[in-house]
Each structure stands twice: as C-alpha cells, then as structure tokens.
Image: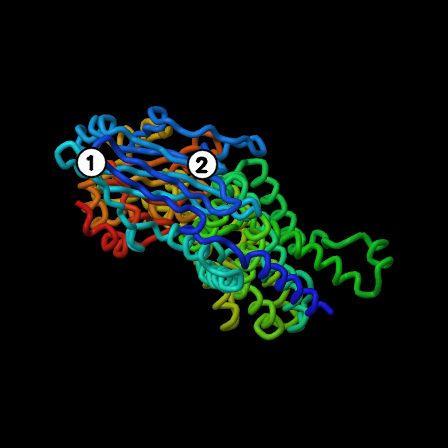
Amino acid sequence: MLQKVIFYIVLSFSFVYANVLNLDEAFDIKYTSDKDGIGFKFGLGQDIYIYKETFDVKISNQSILKMLNLPKPQISNEYEIYMQDFNIFIPINLIKSYMQNGSNKLILEYQGCAENGICYRPQFKQFHLTQNYDKITLKELNLNDDEISDEQSIANTLLNSGFFVALITFFGFGLMLSLTPCVFPMIPILSSIIIAKNKSMSVKNGFLLSFVYVVAMSLAYAIAGVIASYIGSGVSSMLQNSYILGFFAFIFVILAFSMFGFYDIKLPSKFENSINTNSNKIGGFIGVFIMGFASALVVSPCVAAPLAGALLYISQSANVLYGGIMLFVMGLGMGVPLLIIGATSGRILPRPGKWMDMIKISFGFIMLLMSIWILARVIPPFYQLVAYGVVGVVWAVYLGAFDVANSGVIKLKKSLAILIFIYSIMLIVGGFIGGKNPLSPLENVTISTNKSELKFQKISNIDELLDTINSSTKPVLVDFWASWCVSCLELDNKTFSDPDVIKRLSEFNLVKIDVTENSSKNREILRYFSLIDPPAILFFNNANELKSKRIIGYINPKDFINKISDID
C-alpha cells in the first residue's frame, strides 16, 4: 500500500512539472539598432509575466531605467508586473553619454514567472556596444559555462533538468555534503544516542534509530528549503542567535548528564503503558527524531557549492513544494553514512559491561564538548578554549590519567587520558594568552618576529563596498565571513595564513564583510550578490565580478592559488 501511495505521489509530480516553457519560449527578446538608438522587443510566452522590480537596463553598471519610457505595469497580488509584450527604446544620445566614460557594455536584467507558479531564475543579458560614425551597433555576449559561478551553474542545471533527474542530483549533492567537516559532529551525536538507548543494540534497532534521525534531519533541511524559497538568503544566520544556540546547547548538556547516569530521558510511564508493549521504543524514536531535527538546524553544513547552488535554485524558482522535496532528498543523501553507522551498531560497538559504561560516559563528555562548540558562535574565544580545556581535564581524570596502571589495556587507556590532559591544559593556557583556534591553541606562541598576515578592509554596507570595487586600481577580493561559520574560520586559519597565499594576495585589495548578524543591511548585501550564506569569496577586476572565480565553501591553499593564478 505504501509503495502505491509513493508511486502516485511521484507520478503526480512528474505531470505537474512536465509542461514548463524553456527560457527562449518564455522570453523572446529581439533587438534592432539604427542612427536614432537601440530598440528591444520583449515577447512573453503564454501566461508568462515579468516583475517590474526585477527589470533594469544598465550601461557602465549604472541604471538608466528612469530615463526610458516604460509601459504601464499591471497589479497582481500587490506586485507590479508586465503581462503583455512590450517595447523599450534607448536614444543614441543617452548611449553616447555613457560610452564617453569608457564603457561599452549594456546589460538587461529581468525575472519572470508563469501563472501556474513556476518561476524562472533572474536573467542577465549582456551586449557589447560599438559606435560606427553616428550609428550604435550591439552584439549579444553569450556567457559560457566557465564564465558563471559554480553555484549558479548548478542552479542552471537543476532548472533545466526534469523532476526525477533533479531528485537524483540532489541526492548526490547530499552524499557530497556528508563528507564535509561540518557534518562530522552528527556522527558522535547519533552514536551516543544509540549507546544511550540500549546496551546491546541489534542491527535492526540501530538502523531504525538512525533512520528516524536521518528522516528528522532531512525534514529540517526541507523546511529550510521552504524558507529559502521565500527569503533567498540568511537562512543559516537566523539560527545563529544566542537564544536559539543557548537552547540547543542546553539540550546537549541535558543529554550529557543522562549518559552520566543522573537520570533517564523517556516518556512518562503512564504514556508508555497506554500505548503498547513497545512504548519504550516509541518514546526513544520521538527523542531521536527531536535530536535529528535539532542537529540539522544547529550542526548544519556550512554553505558549500552544491548546497549553495541548490538553495540558489530554490530561491530563484520560488517553488515551495519543489524546493522542500529536493532539500529533503538532499538530507537523505547526507544521512547515508549515519545509516551505515546505525546498521552496524550491533557489531562495532562494545558489548555490555564495564567497557560499554565507560564509552557511554565518554560520549557524555563529547556531548558537553558539542554544547561548547555550539555556543562558540556567540561567546568569545577565551571562554571557548577554557571551557574545552576544563571539560577535557575532567574527562582525562575520569579515564584514569593519574591512576595506577597494572595491565597493558589499563596502560593504553592511561596513555590516552594523559594525552587528553596535556591538550586540555594547552587549551586553557591558549585561552589566557589570546588563542582563538581550538585546533591550534598555542598559535600566539611564536619565536619568529616577522610573522606576516593579511590585512582586510572591514566594510559593512553595500554602497561603501561598491565604491571600493569601482575605485580600486588592483583586483579586489571580497570575503563574506561570519563568526558562526566553521568553514570561514578554517579559511582564516589555513588558507589565508599560508605564506604563498599571503604573497599572492599582496597584489589584491582585500575586503571582509562580516554577516554574523542577521540584519537587514547584511541581508541586502547577500541578496545583491545572489549569495545564500557564508563562506563566499568573490573577485573583481576593473569593477566587474569574475564569476568563474567565485569560491563557495572551504578551499585549500594550493587550490586557492591555482584558482586565482590568471587574475592580474
């Protein structure tokens, strides 16, 4: 029965998305030029319209829309739209006045939708202007695949793909994202849950627990996709305020103390008894579902190219249902390693006994470390490092760092405990001497006095940023950064601190945009550059963005240098 329901649902989706006009059918744009100027004729497909607020004509990156005679728009759902074919004309004197500034590029910008709810991605048509005596001629510039950003290329591919192809693509993106560092914290979370639920977890029960966890995680991403369909950017930053992070950190602390044996987390007995004999499992599944949902929201992957492309596609298509389904499938792909861990839990985890109790409590310490990691987005580095160190010291003492070792196994455990103790002390010392990176707590201790570092100009508004880009005589690097973004910190600590990278970037003007806060000003900057969330590195030369050089997510120093090798 379930298979039939799924079949009919998928079949209905295939019919819903079967008849969609392609871009050329939806927007047929023709142009002419003569001694009086340039004319554009916009032919719209059946039931296709263009939003007035997305329509613009630019020369020299400056809008000339107010100087043109435009048709009167219609009002639809509080939006102004162009529903019928229309023409615009650009006088030759207006064009010449802008070409005198050395610009020879004209840009058309627009975005349209169909009445059935399908929306097309924003369109950017570029034309090269040439003056021959008193006549202006223009030639359309076709953007090749290597001239657009990676995430926009992904979005374009998805827009032009069928429903089932998109499903497979999103699942593949999920598999790719499952290998990113930001997803790794989910592994100890799920493992600790499995250990806490049952000391002799069978393969079946371990898989069911992990399956519930992954479904909840996927549902969280689906909801994020729906939100992205409406707002298009700032999804992650909305979840990174102190109240939400504090709440989830508190959940991890509660879980940790349950693993220490202070109490058990389960449904009240009267509810368990009223359901059936399997109520313990049901209660456990509810708790696992909540943890899976929470983990996806807080321990979410930083924006890498696949996820950025997927969210960009969703925000540009503005299709809520389609976006939610695709992000759900992506979540399933991300959960494949977790399903494997759950399915093998009965074999790879220790059997009941003292060892199992010790591992369960060790996962309690891991939960405490996870709560600190969550709060690291909103608390200063000093408190982060000291808190990590204190938890590590207590963990080392519990493991027997200072106990007498009489056997080979105990000696091995003691050696591990001593290593944890030493590193924990380094964390505490690092916090007091100004360290910021838990992976390198003593980075401020150095013998060299000639340590070089990159100097970024801090900019916080779009006007100042555009002025900097337009006035720069050197290539410009713009780094979109946030304190809660793990990959941003990884870029700072590894890529931007590499000597070869520092040397190469000495030829650039460096700008850093801090979008930690989910303010209207930060959302405006992200929307302007069609970004979802950090990390993102953009490059500009002669006031134009080099879209093929755009970097989303972490990139190592060697690949970074290769990426920008031809920028001069």
Local crowd size for mark 1, using a 10 Å CA cut-off: few (<14), some (14–19), many (≥20) = some
Residue in the image at 67% along x and 67% along y: 199
Q: Quadrant of the N terminus?
A: bottom right
Tell me if I can see residue 22 in this picture.
yes
- Is 494 above or below relative to 519? below
- Is 491 above or below relative to 521? below
Q: Amino acid at mark 1?
A: Ile
Q: Which residue is mark 1?
A: 136
Local crowd size for mark 2, using a 10 Å CA cut-off: few (<14), some (14–19), many (≥20) = many
For the image shown, how many numbered marks are present on the structure?
A: 2
Q: Residue 338 location, x and y as percent? A: 56, 64
Q: Which residue is mark 2?
A: 516
Q: Residue 375 location, x and y as percent? A: 52, 41
* Residue situated in front as seen by the camera: 329 or 499: 329
273 horizontally vs 84: left or right: right
Residue in the image at 47% along x and 52% along y: 310
Residue in the image at 36% along x and 44% along y: 29
Name of the residue lying farthest toward the left: 133
Q: In the picture, residue 126 is in which quadrant? A: top left
Q: Earlier in the sequence, mark 1 or mark 2?
A: 1
Q: Amino acid at mark 2?
A: Thr
Q: In the picture, residue 289 is in which quadrant? A: bottom right
